[in-house]
Amino acid sequence: MHKVPLFINGSNFSSQSDSRIAVHNPADNSVIAEVPNTTEAEIDLAVKAAADAFKTWRQVPVVERARVMMTYQALLKQHQDEIAELLSHDTGKVIADARGELWRGIEVVEQAINMPSLLMGETVENVARNIDTASYLQPLGVCVGITPFNFPAMIPLWMFPLAIAAGNTFILKPSEQDPLVPMRLAELFTEAGCPDGVLNVVHGGKEQVEQLLAHGDVRAVSFVGSVPVGQHVYRTATANMKRAQCLAGAKNHMVIMPDANKDQVINNLIGAGMGAAGQRCMAISVAIFVGEAEAWIDQLAEAISKIRPGLWNDTDAAFGPVISARAKARIVQLIAQGKKEGANCLLDGSMFTLPGHDNGHWVGPTLFRDVTPDMSIYREEIFGPVLCCLCVESLDEAIALINNNPFGNGTSIFTASGATARQFRFEAEVGQVGINVPIPVALPFFSFTGWKQSFYGDLHAYGKEGVRFYTQAKTVTTRWFADEANSGPNMTIRLQE
Ligand code: NAD
């Protein structure tokens, strides 16, 4: 049995914990590894390693820190196939999707390479006579990242490269469900030249997260995961006086106008709804058909009925299994609930199994129509290959549905009309909007701007906001005396009229 080590102070470190969590291959439920529930003393050790490393890492010139990122980017590209394969085994994702996920993470490393420019402050000369002001962005210290199961490469890479390039040190607590890729990312980061203690990885669940959130030496917490955990982490971190950015769950709607290109709509909906077995925080889980577009649902059902899940290396498979038996049970229960509450189930994937892999966590593509906003399948984030169709008469009605939804991660509209698209863009109370783009995740020079219950915090992940999250501004006001006459003590605030 592969016992996943901790990664502390630059080395793999065998945990002394006797409490362990099994890591399963979702395709057949076989146990492929065990992660430790890191002990209290080991968490302290990781924080101490990061705090000690911060003293020297923050002195390293930013161009040298950026060079580590350049080497890291090259190493990640060199090991792309190997990491993608590991990711497929750990998550069940089909290989093309695993490669795509890693690529999205590599792009953030590329952004971190730009850190010298990103850290540039502001200056104003002569703000008062002979006085100049400049601002600098300085690192915070020890930062913590807590990541979800669904993107074990991309989401850790959203966090530690930027934090570390900005001069911080980092402790990653990856999902206990698929920790193998994050460990490989840490090993390669060391190979890229990251000094000992700058990046550390600990494992576990709630207990380990609580200890990190309470630790006096931790300055900032980045979290990505479900809404209840995100709310808890945000409340606890901020109550403990830490900076926090918590990205949470979603229910993303796509609006289909009757003037849209029908074939594009169908293809894009299938990919955005079913890709990665619907286990993406930006997956489309609700399709709103406006007016005559309703007639396209039958064709959508026919197209979806032709795709199926399969093994990671099956090039005909559209997606893999869901992550766990628990996740599958919840999805199947929600599908049953949807039927009970009166939605019309056009395709039901709850009975799907892959011959020869019957113990895997398979769910086939599922499509509902006649869904209403009071139904569980509309209210809950299902996080499975389940698409809900609703029909409305107007764009205003579609926008009202979206704005009444508590989530605000992503939304999109398919239309041929600029005026319709502009109204949608302006009125949708959602942080990421796609126009004829189903999953509008911007490249990492922008930020990942979820709203409402999809995000708790002030500064979003990556982009300029990500850099601000991992830094604090220092403004310095300077005067050098030349030949001015000394006018004596100044007891009041001077007017500069
Ligand atoms: P999760 O909330 O179960 O777990 C996330 C992390 O929190 C894991 O590292 C886990 O060990 C830890 N954790 C779990 N319970 C905890 C507790 N009680 N206290 C402290 N820490 C705890 O999420 P998941 O199932 O791994 O991931 C799926 C969820 O993540 C979905 O809701 C999805 O929408 C969301 N997600 C959001 C984004 C985004 O960008 N908004 C991106 C990816 C995933």
Image (cartoon, helix red, strand yellow):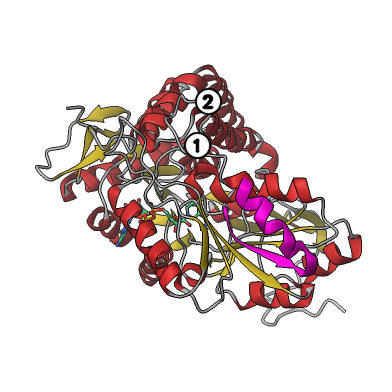
Q: Which mark is residue 315?
A: 2
| Label 1 Cα neighbours within 10 Å, binned few <14 / some 14-19 / many ≥20 | few
Q: Is residue 283 visible?
A: yes
Q: Is residue 256 visible?
A: no
Amino acid tagged 2 = Thr
Mark 1 / mark 2, whichever is N-terminal: 1
Magenta residues, dominant SS class: helix
Q: In the image, residue 402 lies at what x, y percent?
A: 65, 72
* Residue at image coords 80%, 80%: 495
Residue numbers of the magenta segment: 283-302
Q: In the image, residue 140 lies at what x, y percent?
A: 48, 52
Q: Is residue 92 left or right of residue 391?
A: left
Q: Are marks 1 and 2 in contact (CB under 8 Å)?
A: no
Label 1 or label 2, whichever lies nearer to me, is: 2
Give residue 74's quadrant in the image.
top right
* Residue at image coords 65%, 75%: 401
Reply above or below: 195 against 289: above
Quarter holding the N terminus is top left
Q: In the image, residue 23 lies at what x, y percent?
A: 26, 38
Reply above or below: 422 against 384: below
Magenta span includes 240: no
